[in-house]
Image (cartoon, grey):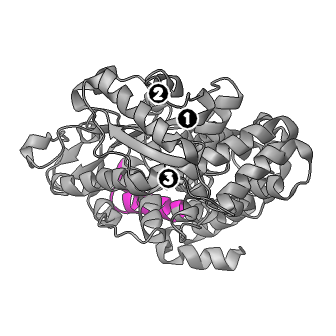
Amino acid sequence: MNSKCLHQHIQPQCNNHFLACDLYHVQLSLEFIDTEQFQRLRDLKQLGLTYMVYPGAVHSRFEHSLGVYWLANEAINILEKYQGLELGIERTDVQTVKLAGLLHDVGHGPFSHMFEREFLPRVLNGLEWSHEKMSQKMIEYIVDEHNIDIDPEILKNVKEMIGASESCASTCLKEKSFLYDIVANGRNGIDVDKFDYIIRDSRACGLGCNFQFQRLFENMRVIDDEICYRAKEYLTVHKLFSTRADLHRTVYMHAKVKAVELMCVDAMIKANDYLQIASYINNPADYWKLDDTILKTIETSSHQDLKESRDLILRIRRRDLYQFCNEFAVPKDKLEYFKPVTPQDIICSQESGGIALEEDDVIVANVKIDLTRGRDNPLESIKFFEDFESTGKFPIKDDRISHLLPACYQDRIVRVYSRKPELVEEVSKAFENFQLQTYGMKTQVHATPESKKRPRHFR
Protein backbone atom coordinates (compact mmCIF):
# COMPACT_ATOMS: atom_id res chain seq x y z
CA MET A 1 0.00 0.00 0.00
CA ASN A 2 1.43 3.42 -0.93
CA SER A 3 0.90 6.79 0.74
CA LYS A 4 -1.60 7.93 -1.90
CA CYS A 5 -3.88 4.91 -1.30
CA LEU A 6 -3.78 5.24 2.48
CA HIS A 7 -4.27 9.00 2.32
CA GLN A 8 -7.38 8.45 0.21
CA HIS A 9 -8.54 5.87 2.76
CA ILE A 10 -8.53 8.38 5.62
CA GLN A 11 -9.08 11.64 3.70
CA PRO A 12 -12.78 11.99 4.77
CA GLN A 13 -11.63 12.10 8.40
CA CYS A 14 -9.21 14.97 7.95
CA ASN A 15 -10.12 18.53 8.90
CA ASN A 16 -8.26 21.78 8.49
CA HIS A 17 -7.28 21.96 12.14
CA PHE A 18 -5.34 18.72 11.98
CA LEU A 19 -4.41 18.62 8.29
CA ALA A 20 -0.69 19.17 8.72
CA CYS A 21 -0.57 16.76 11.64
CA ASP A 22 -2.57 14.15 9.71
CA LEU A 23 0.00 14.17 6.91
CA TYR A 24 2.72 13.46 9.43
CA HIS A 25 0.61 10.72 11.01
CA VAL A 26 0.08 9.10 7.62
CA GLN A 27 3.80 9.07 6.91
CA LEU A 28 4.60 7.52 10.29
CA SER A 29 1.84 4.93 9.85
CA LEU A 30 3.19 4.03 6.42
CA GLU A 31 6.64 3.44 7.86
CA PHE A 32 5.07 0.64 9.91
CA ILE A 33 2.77 -0.61 7.15
CA ASP A 34 5.54 -0.84 4.57
CA THR A 35 7.51 -3.42 6.53
CA GLU A 36 7.60 -7.15 5.97
CA GLN A 37 6.43 -7.65 9.57
CA PHE A 38 3.18 -5.75 9.03
CA GLN A 39 2.68 -7.11 5.51
CA ARG A 40 2.75 -10.58 7.10
CA LEU A 41 -0.80 -9.86 8.27
CA ARG A 42 -1.95 -10.38 4.66
CA ASP A 43 -1.14 -14.08 5.16
CA LEU A 44 -3.15 -14.41 8.38
CA LYS A 45 -6.84 -14.97 7.74
CA GLN A 46 -8.92 -13.04 10.26
CA LEU A 47 -11.05 -16.10 11.00
CA GLY A 48 -8.40 -18.76 10.56
CA LEU A 49 -9.86 -21.95 9.11
CA THR A 50 -13.47 -20.74 9.17
CA TYR A 51 -13.36 -20.35 5.37
CA MET A 52 -13.50 -24.16 5.18
CA VAL A 53 -17.15 -23.82 6.24
CA TYR A 54 -17.95 -20.21 5.29
CA PRO A 55 -16.21 -19.75 1.91
CA GLY A 56 -16.38 -15.95 2.09
CA ALA A 57 -14.37 -15.77 5.32
CA VAL A 58 -11.06 -15.15 3.59
CA HIS A 59 -10.44 -11.61 4.83
CA SER A 60 -7.14 -11.00 6.56
CA ARG A 61 -5.70 -9.42 9.68
CA PHE A 62 -4.19 -6.83 7.36
CA GLU A 63 -7.51 -5.33 6.29
CA HIS A 64 -8.91 -5.66 9.81
CA SER A 65 -5.94 -3.68 11.14
CA LEU A 66 -6.54 -0.91 8.59
CA GLY A 67 -10.21 -0.90 9.60
CA VAL A 68 -9.37 -0.53 13.29
CA TYR A 69 -6.91 2.25 12.39
CA TRP A 70 -9.70 4.10 10.58
CA LEU A 71 -12.22 3.61 13.39
CA ALA A 72 -9.71 4.67 16.05
CA ASN A 73 -9.16 7.82 13.99
CA GLU A 74 -12.93 8.39 13.85
CA ALA A 75 -13.36 7.96 17.59
CA ILE A 76 -10.52 10.23 18.68
CA ASN A 77 -11.51 12.88 16.15
CA ILE A 78 -15.09 12.97 17.45
CA LEU A 79 -13.90 13.34 21.04
CA GLU A 80 -11.42 16.02 19.98
CA LYS A 81 -14.09 17.92 18.06
CA TYR A 82 -16.56 18.16 20.94
CA GLN A 83 -14.37 17.91 24.05
CA GLY A 84 -10.82 18.50 22.84
CA LEU A 85 -10.07 21.56 24.94
CA GLU A 86 -11.87 20.22 27.99
CA LEU A 87 -9.99 16.90 27.85
CA GLY A 88 -6.64 18.32 26.78
CA ILE A 89 -6.43 16.10 23.70
CA GLU A 90 -3.14 16.78 21.93
CA ARG A 91 -1.84 15.84 18.54
CA THR A 92 0.37 13.16 20.08
CA ASP A 93 -2.76 11.60 21.64
CA VAL A 94 -4.38 11.35 18.22
CA GLN A 95 -1.28 9.78 16.75
CA THR A 96 -0.91 7.32 19.61
CA VAL A 97 -4.50 6.06 19.44
CA LYS A 98 -4.33 5.61 15.66
CA LEU A 99 -1.04 3.68 15.83
CA ALA A 100 -2.45 1.46 18.56
CA GLY A 101 -5.38 0.65 16.27
CA LEU A 102 -3.07 -0.03 13.35
CA LEU A 103 -0.62 -2.26 15.24
CA HIS A 104 -2.83 -4.04 17.77
CA ASP A 105 -2.70 -7.38 15.88
CA VAL A 106 0.84 -7.27 14.51
CA GLY A 107 1.80 -10.09 16.90
CA HIS A 108 -1.15 -12.34 16.07
CA GLY A 109 -0.51 -16.01 15.45
CA PRO A 110 -1.71 -18.27 12.61
CA PHE A 111 -5.27 -19.55 12.37
CA SER A 112 -6.99 -16.85 14.44
CA HIS A 113 -6.90 -17.65 18.19
CA MET A 114 -6.27 -21.36 17.69
CA PHE A 115 -2.49 -20.93 17.81
CA GLU A 116 -2.38 -19.39 21.29
CA ARG A 117 -5.39 -21.11 22.88
CA GLU A 118 -5.17 -24.62 21.48
CA PHE A 119 -1.72 -25.33 20.02
CA LEU A 120 0.77 -23.61 22.34
CA PRO A 121 -0.75 -24.82 25.66
CA ARG A 122 -0.55 -28.42 24.44
CA VAL A 123 3.07 -28.32 23.27
CA LEU A 124 4.40 -26.01 25.99
CA ASN A 125 2.74 -27.53 29.06
CA GLY A 126 0.00 -24.97 29.58
CA LEU A 127 2.15 -21.90 28.87
CA GLU A 128 0.11 -18.70 28.96
CA TRP A 129 1.04 -16.59 25.95
CA SER A 130 -0.92 -13.83 24.29
CA HIS A 131 -0.74 -12.18 20.90
CA GLU A 132 -1.11 -8.80 22.66
CA LYS A 133 2.24 -9.28 24.42
CA MET A 134 3.81 -10.43 21.17
CA SER A 135 2.39 -7.35 19.43
CA GLN A 136 4.19 -5.19 21.98
CA LYS A 137 7.47 -7.02 21.34
CA MET A 138 6.96 -6.94 17.58
CA ILE A 139 6.42 -3.17 17.58
CA GLU A 140 9.74 -2.66 19.37
CA TYR A 141 11.42 -5.01 16.90
CA ILE A 142 9.97 -3.16 13.89
CA VAL A 143 11.12 0.20 15.26
CA ASP A 144 14.66 -1.09 15.81
CA GLU A 145 14.88 -3.13 12.60
CA HIS A 146 13.67 -0.30 10.35
CA ASN A 147 15.05 2.67 12.30
CA ILE A 148 11.62 4.27 12.62
CA ASP A 149 11.83 7.70 14.19
CA ILE A 150 9.09 7.66 16.80
CA ASP A 151 8.86 9.54 20.08
CA PRO A 152 9.70 7.10 22.93
CA GLU A 153 6.68 8.28 24.96
CA ILE A 154 4.34 7.63 22.02
CA LEU A 155 5.88 4.18 21.53
CA LYS A 156 5.42 3.38 25.23
CA ASN A 157 1.77 4.51 25.19
CA VAL A 158 0.98 2.61 21.99
CA LYS A 159 2.18 -0.62 23.60
CA GLU A 160 0.21 0.09 26.76
CA MET A 161 -2.97 0.76 24.77
CA ILE A 162 -2.60 -2.56 22.95
CA GLY A 163 -2.28 -4.37 26.28
CA ALA A 164 -5.04 -2.35 27.96
CA SER A 165 -7.55 -5.21 27.76
CA GLU A 166 -5.22 -7.30 29.94
CA SER A 167 -4.19 -4.61 32.44
CA CYS A 168 -7.20 -2.42 33.07
CA ALA A 169 -6.25 -1.84 36.71
CA SER A 170 -3.08 0.01 35.71
CA THR A 171 -4.36 1.83 32.63
CA CYS A 172 -7.50 3.13 34.38
CA LEU A 173 -5.24 5.03 36.80
CA LYS A 174 -3.32 6.78 34.03
CA GLU A 175 -3.80 10.37 32.97
CA LYS A 176 -6.32 10.54 30.11
CA SER A 177 -7.26 6.93 30.78
CA PHE A 178 -10.24 7.33 28.42
CA LEU A 179 -7.75 7.07 25.55
CA TYR A 180 -7.10 3.46 26.60
CA ASP A 181 -10.80 2.64 26.13
CA ILE A 182 -10.75 3.23 22.37
CA VAL A 183 -8.77 0.34 20.85
CA ALA A 184 -8.66 -2.45 23.48
CA ASN A 185 -11.05 -1.61 26.28
CA GLY A 186 -10.33 -3.58 29.44
CA ARG A 187 -12.75 -1.46 31.42
CA ASN A 188 -16.00 -2.58 29.80
CA GLY A 189 -15.25 -4.22 26.44
CA ILE A 190 -16.60 -1.51 24.10
CA ASP A 191 -13.83 -0.76 21.61
CA VAL A 192 -13.25 -0.17 17.91
CA ASP A 193 -11.54 -3.54 17.51
CA LYS A 194 -14.93 -5.19 18.15
CA PHE A 195 -16.72 -2.64 15.96
CA ASP A 196 -14.60 -3.64 12.99
CA TYR A 197 -14.49 -7.41 13.34
CA ILE A 198 -18.18 -7.79 14.17
CA ILE A 199 -19.28 -5.97 11.03
CA ARG A 200 -16.49 -7.35 8.82
CA ASP A 201 -16.96 -10.97 9.93
CA SER A 202 -20.76 -10.78 9.62
CA ARG A 203 -20.51 -9.51 6.06
CA ALA A 204 -17.83 -12.04 5.04
CA CYS A 205 -19.92 -14.94 6.35
CA GLY A 206 -23.12 -13.76 4.69
CA LEU A 207 -24.83 -12.86 7.95
CA GLY A 208 -26.93 -9.82 8.69
CA CYS A 209 -25.68 -7.32 11.26
CA ASN A 210 -27.99 -4.85 12.97
CA PHE A 211 -25.32 -3.35 15.19
CA GLN A 212 -24.52 0.27 14.21
CA PHE A 213 -21.30 1.61 15.70
CA GLN A 214 -22.10 5.06 14.29
CA ARG A 215 -24.85 5.47 16.90
CA LEU A 216 -22.33 4.94 19.68
CA PHE A 217 -19.89 7.40 18.10
CA GLU A 218 -22.65 9.99 17.88
CA ASN A 219 -23.76 9.45 21.48
CA MET A 220 -20.54 9.19 23.47
CA ARG A 221 -18.74 11.64 25.69
CA VAL A 222 -16.04 11.52 28.35
CA ILE A 223 -17.14 12.04 31.94
CA ASP A 224 -14.61 11.72 34.77
CA ASP A 225 -11.99 10.32 32.40
CA GLU A 226 -14.27 7.54 31.15
CA ILE A 227 -16.08 7.17 27.83
CA CYS A 228 -19.81 7.08 28.60
CA TYR A 229 -22.87 6.68 26.39
CA ARG A 230 -26.22 8.37 26.19
CA ALA A 231 -28.80 6.35 28.12
CA LYS A 232 -31.11 6.02 25.13
CA GLU A 233 -28.44 3.89 23.42
CA TYR A 234 -28.55 1.17 26.06
CA LEU A 235 -29.99 -1.35 23.62
CA THR A 236 -27.40 -0.42 20.97
CA VAL A 237 -24.70 -1.30 23.49
CA HIS A 238 -26.47 -4.55 24.32
CA LYS A 239 -26.71 -5.35 20.61
CA LEU A 240 -22.91 -5.04 20.34
CA PHE A 241 -22.42 -7.81 22.89
CA SER A 242 -25.30 -9.99 21.73
CA THR A 243 -24.13 -9.81 18.09
CA ARG A 244 -20.67 -10.86 19.20
CA ALA A 245 -22.15 -13.80 21.11
CA ASP A 246 -24.20 -14.80 18.04
CA LEU A 247 -21.03 -14.79 15.92
CA HIS A 248 -19.33 -17.06 18.42
CA ARG A 249 -22.23 -19.48 18.37
CA THR A 250 -22.87 -19.58 14.62
CA VAL A 251 -19.43 -18.90 13.14
CA TYR A 252 -16.39 -18.96 15.42
CA MET A 253 -17.55 -22.04 17.36
CA HIS A 254 -19.43 -23.75 14.53
CA ALA A 255 -19.20 -27.52 15.04
CA LYS A 256 -17.58 -28.15 11.63
CA VAL A 257 -15.20 -25.20 12.02
CA LYS A 258 -14.12 -26.66 15.33
CA ALA A 259 -13.60 -30.08 13.75
CA VAL A 260 -11.22 -28.58 11.17
CA GLU A 261 -9.40 -26.63 13.89
CA LEU A 262 -8.97 -29.75 16.02
CA MET A 263 -7.42 -31.56 13.07
CA CYS A 264 -5.14 -28.65 12.30
CA VAL A 265 -3.98 -28.53 15.93
CA ASP A 266 -3.20 -32.25 15.82
CA ALA A 267 -1.30 -31.80 12.55
CA MET A 268 0.79 -28.94 13.97
CA ILE A 269 1.51 -30.84 17.19
CA LYS A 270 2.76 -33.84 15.20
CA ALA A 271 4.90 -31.51 13.06
CA ASN A 272 6.28 -29.48 15.94
CA ASP A 273 9.27 -31.68 16.77
CA TYR A 274 10.54 -31.47 13.21
CA LEU A 275 9.57 -27.87 12.33
CA GLN A 276 9.96 -26.41 15.84
CA ILE A 277 6.85 -24.27 15.30
CA ALA A 278 6.46 -23.32 18.96
CA SER A 279 10.03 -21.99 19.15
CA TYR A 280 9.09 -19.12 16.83
CA ILE A 281 7.45 -17.29 19.74
CA ASN A 282 10.82 -16.80 21.45
CA ASN A 283 12.06 -14.14 19.07
CA PRO A 284 10.18 -11.53 16.98
CA ALA A 285 12.86 -11.87 14.29
CA ASP A 286 11.68 -15.46 13.76
CA TYR A 287 8.04 -15.03 14.70
CA TRP A 288 7.15 -12.68 11.85
CA LYS A 289 7.98 -15.50 9.41
CA LEU A 290 5.20 -17.68 10.87
CA ASP A 291 1.77 -17.42 9.24
CA ASP A 292 -1.06 -19.53 7.82
CA THR A 293 1.22 -20.90 5.10
CA ILE A 294 2.70 -23.28 7.69
CA LEU A 295 -0.10 -25.65 6.65
CA LYS A 296 1.10 -25.63 3.04
CA THR A 297 4.69 -26.12 4.23
CA ILE A 298 3.64 -29.32 5.97
CA GLU A 299 1.40 -30.44 3.12
CA THR A 300 4.02 -30.11 0.40
CA SER A 301 6.95 -31.54 2.33
CA SER A 302 8.11 -35.05 1.52
CA HIS A 303 9.93 -35.56 4.81
CA GLN A 304 8.99 -38.75 6.62
CA ASP A 305 8.76 -36.96 9.98
CA LEU A 306 5.79 -34.99 8.64
CA LYS A 307 3.84 -37.93 7.23
CA GLU A 308 1.26 -38.08 10.02
CA SER A 309 0.69 -34.33 9.75
CA ARG A 310 0.38 -34.55 5.96
CA ASP A 311 -2.17 -37.34 6.28
CA LEU A 312 -4.30 -35.22 8.61
CA ILE A 313 -4.19 -32.25 6.24
CA LEU A 314 -5.12 -34.55 3.37
CA ARG A 315 -8.15 -35.66 5.39
CA ILE A 316 -9.13 -32.00 5.80
CA ARG A 317 -8.80 -31.42 2.05
CA ARG A 318 -10.96 -34.47 1.33
CA ARG A 319 -13.51 -33.46 3.96
CA ASP A 320 -12.82 -36.59 5.99
CA LEU A 321 -13.16 -34.63 9.22
CA TYR A 322 -13.22 -35.64 12.83
CA GLN A 323 -16.85 -36.52 13.44
CA PHE A 324 -18.96 -34.28 15.63
CA CYS A 325 -21.06 -36.66 17.70
CA ASN A 326 -23.20 -34.48 19.95
CA GLU A 327 -23.22 -31.64 22.46
CA PHE A 328 -25.04 -30.40 25.52
CA ALA A 329 -25.37 -27.06 27.28
CA VAL A 330 -24.36 -27.12 30.93
CA PRO A 331 -27.50 -26.50 33.04
CA LYS A 332 -27.67 -22.95 34.36
CA ASP A 333 -27.65 -24.03 38.00
CA LYS A 334 -24.46 -26.04 37.40
CA LEU A 335 -22.41 -23.29 35.73
CA GLU A 336 -20.77 -22.05 38.91
CA TYR A 337 -19.23 -25.44 39.68
CA PHE A 338 -18.52 -26.57 36.14
CA LYS A 339 -15.17 -28.23 35.45
CA PRO A 340 -14.02 -28.82 31.87
CA VAL A 341 -14.89 -32.30 30.63
CA THR A 342 -12.00 -34.47 29.46
CA PRO A 343 -11.77 -37.42 27.06
CA GLN A 344 -11.03 -39.58 30.11
CA ASP A 345 -14.40 -38.57 31.59
CA ILE A 346 -16.13 -39.89 28.48
CA ILE A 347 -14.13 -43.11 28.35
CA CYS A 348 -14.86 -43.85 31.99
CA SER A 349 -18.57 -43.54 31.23
CA GLN A 350 -18.54 -46.44 28.76
CA GLU A 351 -20.74 -49.44 29.39
CA SER A 352 -19.09 -52.84 29.22
CA GLY A 353 -19.61 -55.00 26.18
CA GLY A 354 -18.94 -52.48 23.44
CA ILE A 355 -15.78 -51.45 21.64
CA ALA A 356 -13.27 -50.24 24.22
CA LEU A 357 -12.46 -46.59 23.50
CA GLU A 358 -9.00 -45.18 23.99
CA GLU A 359 -8.25 -41.62 25.04
CA ASP A 360 -6.92 -40.69 21.59
CA ASP A 361 -10.23 -41.74 20.01
CA VAL A 362 -12.16 -38.94 21.73
CA ILE A 363 -11.88 -35.17 21.68
CA VAL A 364 -13.89 -32.96 24.00
CA ALA A 365 -14.35 -29.28 23.17
CA ASN A 366 -15.44 -27.17 26.13
CA VAL A 367 -16.95 -24.11 24.50
CA LYS A 368 -17.59 -20.88 26.41
CA ILE A 369 -19.81 -18.18 24.92
CA ASP A 370 -20.45 -15.01 26.89
CA LEU A 371 -20.94 -11.26 26.53
CA THR A 372 -17.23 -10.53 27.27
CA ARG A 373 -17.52 -10.50 31.08
CA GLY A 374 -17.90 -14.19 31.85
CA ARG A 375 -21.01 -14.87 33.89
CA ASP A 376 -21.47 -11.16 34.67
CA ASN A 377 -23.53 -8.64 32.76
CA PRO A 378 -21.05 -6.43 30.85
CA LEU A 379 -23.49 -3.54 30.82
CA GLU A 380 -23.18 -3.14 34.56
CA SER A 381 -19.60 -1.91 34.04
CA ILE A 382 -20.69 0.70 31.46
CA LYS A 383 -21.64 4.23 32.48
CA PHE A 384 -24.38 6.29 30.84
CA PHE A 385 -25.49 9.92 30.88
CA GLU A 386 -28.92 11.46 30.43
CA ASP A 387 -28.21 14.09 27.77
CA PHE A 388 -25.33 16.18 26.50
CA GLU A 389 -25.90 18.84 29.15
CA SER A 390 -25.48 16.23 31.91
CA THR A 391 -22.36 16.17 34.07
CA GLY A 392 -23.08 12.93 35.92
CA LYS A 393 -22.81 9.30 34.90
CA PHE A 394 -24.66 6.22 36.11
CA PRO A 395 -25.10 2.48 35.40
CA ILE A 396 -28.39 1.03 34.19
CA LYS A 397 -29.82 -2.24 35.39
CA ASP A 398 -31.51 -4.59 32.92
CA ASP A 399 -34.86 -4.56 34.71
CA ARG A 400 -35.11 -0.80 34.14
CA ILE A 401 -35.05 -1.38 30.37
CA SER A 402 -36.71 -4.66 29.47
CA HIS A 403 -37.65 -7.99 31.01
CA LEU A 404 -36.76 -9.64 27.69
CA LEU A 405 -33.02 -9.22 28.20
CA PRO A 406 -31.13 -12.36 29.29
CA ALA A 407 -31.11 -13.48 32.89
CA CYS A 408 -27.86 -15.41 32.32
CA TYR A 409 -24.81 -14.07 30.51
CA GLN A 410 -22.78 -17.17 29.74
CA ASP A 411 -23.24 -20.50 27.95
CA ARG A 412 -21.02 -23.50 28.53
CA ILE A 413 -21.34 -26.08 25.78
CA VAL A 414 -19.65 -29.46 25.90
CA ARG A 415 -19.03 -31.08 22.51
CA VAL A 416 -17.61 -34.47 21.77
CA TYR A 417 -15.83 -35.58 18.59
CA SER A 418 -14.57 -38.91 17.34
CA ARG A 419 -11.23 -38.98 15.55
CA LYS A 420 -12.36 -42.16 13.77
CA PRO A 421 -15.68 -42.19 11.89
CA GLU A 422 -16.34 -45.83 12.77
CA LEU A 423 -16.40 -45.00 16.50
CA VAL A 424 -19.13 -42.35 16.42
CA GLU A 425 -21.75 -44.70 17.88
CA GLU A 426 -19.57 -45.82 20.78
CA VAL A 427 -18.45 -42.28 21.57
CA SER A 428 -22.06 -41.05 21.45
CA LYS A 429 -23.21 -43.78 23.86
CA ALA A 430 -20.43 -42.97 26.30
CA PHE A 431 -21.28 -39.27 26.03
CA GLU A 432 -24.92 -39.96 26.90
CA ASN A 433 -23.86 -42.09 29.86
CA PHE A 434 -21.63 -39.26 31.08
CA GLN A 435 -24.60 -36.90 31.10
CA LEU A 436 -26.74 -39.40 33.01
CA GLN A 437 -24.01 -39.96 35.59
CA THR A 438 -23.27 -36.25 35.98
CA TYR A 439 -26.71 -34.65 35.85
CA GLY A 440 -29.10 -37.57 36.30
CA MET A 441 -30.54 -36.99 32.83
CA LYS A 442 -29.58 -36.53 29.19
CA THR A 443 -29.09 -32.79 28.70
CA GLN A 444 -28.37 -32.95 24.95
CA VAL A 445 -31.18 -31.71 22.73
CA HIS A 446 -31.50 -34.89 20.65
CA ALA A 447 -29.84 -38.23 20.11
CA THR A 448 -26.96 -38.54 17.70
CA PRO A 449 -28.54 -39.06 14.24
CA GLU A 450 -28.31 -42.60 12.88
CA SER A 451 -26.73 -41.27 9.69
CA LYS A 452 -23.73 -40.07 11.72
CA LYS A 453 -23.28 -43.52 13.20
CA ARG A 454 -22.79 -44.99 9.73
CA PRO A 455 -19.24 -44.04 8.72
CA ARG A 456 -18.72 -42.38 5.37
CA HIS A 457 -16.19 -44.02 3.08
CA PHE A 458 -13.77 -41.87 1.14
CA ARG A 459 -11.82 -43.04 -1.85
Between residues 353 and 446, which one lies in front from this camera angle? 353
Categorize mark 2 by other alpha carbons within 10 Å: few (<14), some (14-19), many (20+): many
Q: Position of residue 147 (x, y in %)?
A: 83, 51
Q: Which residue is mark 2?
A: 346
> Marks 3 and 1, Cα distance to the nearest angstrom?
17 Å
Between residues 75 and 390, which one lies in front from this camera angle? 75
Label at residue 362:
1
Residue 98 sits inside the magenta stretch: no
> Marks 1 and 2, Cα distance to the nearest angstrom?
8 Å
Q: Position of residue 199 (x, y in %)?
A: 42, 65
Categorize mark 1 by other alpha carbons within 10 Å: few (<14), some (14-19), many (20+): many
The amino acid type of the residue labelled 3 equals: Arg
The amino acid type of the residue labelled 1 equals: Val
25 left or right, relative to 284: left
Q: Earlier in the sequence, mark 1 or mark 2?
A: 2
The answer to whether residue 244 is seen in the rendering is yes
Residue furthest to the right in view is 303
Please state the extent of the stretch shown in magenta in the rendering: 68-86
Please state, as top left, top right, bottom left or bottom right, where the C terminus lies in the image. bottom right
Residue furthest to the front in view is 353
Q: Position of residue 27 (x, y in %)?
A: 69, 66
Q: Residue at x 30, y 40 (%)?
A: 444
Circle 3 or circle 1, nearest the eye: 3
Dot 2 falls on a residue whose secondary structure is helix
Q: Earlier in the sequence, mark 3 or mark 1?
A: 1
Residue 69 sits inside the magenta stretch: yes
Please state, as top left, top right, bottom left or bottom right, where the N terminus lies in the image. bottom right
Dot 1 falls on a residue whose secondary structure is strand
Between residues 12 and 424, which one lies in front from this camera angle? 424
Main SS, magenta residues: helix
Label at residue 454:
3
The answer to the question of whether label 1 and label 2 lie on touching residues, with beta carbons closer than 8 A, is yes
